[in-house]
Amino acid sequence: MARRNQNPVFIDAFAGCGGLSLGLMQAGLNGLFAIEKDEFAFLTLRRNLIDRDTKSKFAWPRWLPKKHFAIDQLIEEYRSNLVALRNEVDILAGGPPCQGFSSAGRRKADDPRNRLFKSYVELVRLLEPKIVLMENVRGFTMNFGKDESVNNYATELRELLADRYVVHERLIDLSAFGVPQQRTRYFLIAMVPALGDIDPFDIIKDRLPKFLRNQGLQAPVSAWSAISDLEKGKGGTKPSADTKGFLEIVPSNRRTAYQKLMGVGAKLVSDLRLARHRPEIEKRFGEIIEICHAEGRLNTSVGADIRHRYGLKKQALRVLDPDMPSPTITSMPDDLLHYAEPRTLTVRENARLQSFPDWFKFEGKYTTGGERRQHEVPRFTQVANAVPPLAARAIGEALAEVIANAKLGPSSPAQLRRRGEGSVQKLELVS
């Protein structure tokens, strides 16, 4: 385990672009390294959390190349190095890819990505961390078949961890942490018994008011509070800095506490490229926005009557409510319309709704399509798949407190068996 005189050490598996890692680092935890298979997502993580000249970055061991890795490849090629890290890693964090059991997707029971959490468990067994922290979609807790015992991945994961850890679970609406988005996610925190007989989610909830005060926020944070300084009607537009033939938004002055918080440390704001909508599409979007405002359809999928009127095939199209947190951000940039301007959102606006600070820059393609969607993770998808850093920071601070207050000592197999039985908490929504 990490020494008592240093901050907890973590490794991030299935790290994506680094939202969870960033939040844990902001909470004062020390990142050792991260595992991410996709090249684009790793480029983003490397730019912001490895190569950036800041204290908040991964230490990165000499034996591990700074490149994208599949978790199975890491385990196969560096097993002895991973075993050597026992007693050095406090937290193994991460969330296996969720597309196969996401309610926003097609929920394929045989999607091979669904089984990657077993590789995650293998990594747990190699590293033996104090705490296992996992985030996933709500669908991770749902059954694919009619039999209640079939393909419930949360149950299977819990059973795989129960021989060593006391497992706690919650469904949490992350807007409670000041994230300007209604985003309910499944969280698992498994702790060795030596950390004490305590529910970490109780600590997280008890600390929440102070956490929000420290950030200068009051939850919930509305979409307008998050992105109103990025309206093109206020700051105007200019040629895109990174894509010829496109325009990007010119930010206006930050007005709200949330906008100012996201601006800390940011010299330039990136990823503001606007989509190129045809005039007839802009006209259609403007009419849909007006209808949704007038008929109270904000933040919900537009009705069948609107889809029929405009010949829309998309079922999930929604218009932001400026006075409420955004609906859950998805990887499809045309799923969500601005609350006032006839357009879809930029990568930066989605990143704001995910609580990424403005200094955090995304790499790779903006979008992708066709067969490439199975193999590439462009910027919009990186943002959508991430754990909101603000929520990760609140959770990281609570876990650091748990570790600091624990009386660490060896646990016998009998203790593990006894304290692991019946320890699973009822899933509930924290709001």
Image (cartoon, rainbow, N blue to C red):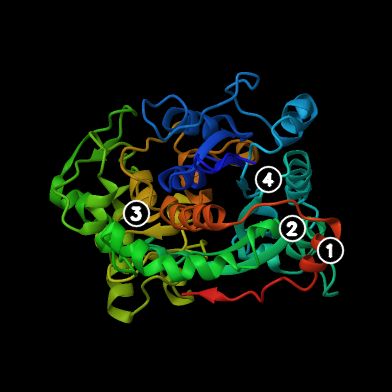
The answer to whether residue 175 is visible is no
Give me the disc on residue 165.
2
Is label 2 in a helix, a strand or a loop? loop
Reading the chain from its start, which is encountered first: label 1 or label 3?
A: 3
Name the residue type under label 1.
Arg
Reading the chain from its start, which is encountered first: label 1 or label 2?
A: 2
Q: CA distance from mark 2 to mark 4?
A: 10 Å
Q: Nearer the viewer, residue 335 or 147?
A: 147
Reading the chain from its start, which is encountered first: label 3 or label 4?
A: 4
Foreground tag (2 vs 3):
2
Is label 1 in a helix, a strand or a loop? helix
How many residues crowd mark 4 within 10 Å: few (<14), some (14–19), many (20+)?
Answer: many
Q: CA distance from mark 1 to mark 4?
A: 18 Å
Q: Are marks 1 and 2 in contact (CB under 8 Å)?
A: no
How many residues crowd mark 2 within 10 Å: few (<14), some (14–19), many (20+)?
Answer: many
Q: Residue sitting at 51 percent across and 48 percent down?
A: 386
Q: Position of residue 253 (x, y in %)?
A: 13, 48
Q: Are marks 2 and 4 in contact (CB under 8 Å)?
A: no
Residue at mark 3: 281
Residue at mark 1: 417
Q: Position of residue 358 (x, y in %)?
A: 31, 42
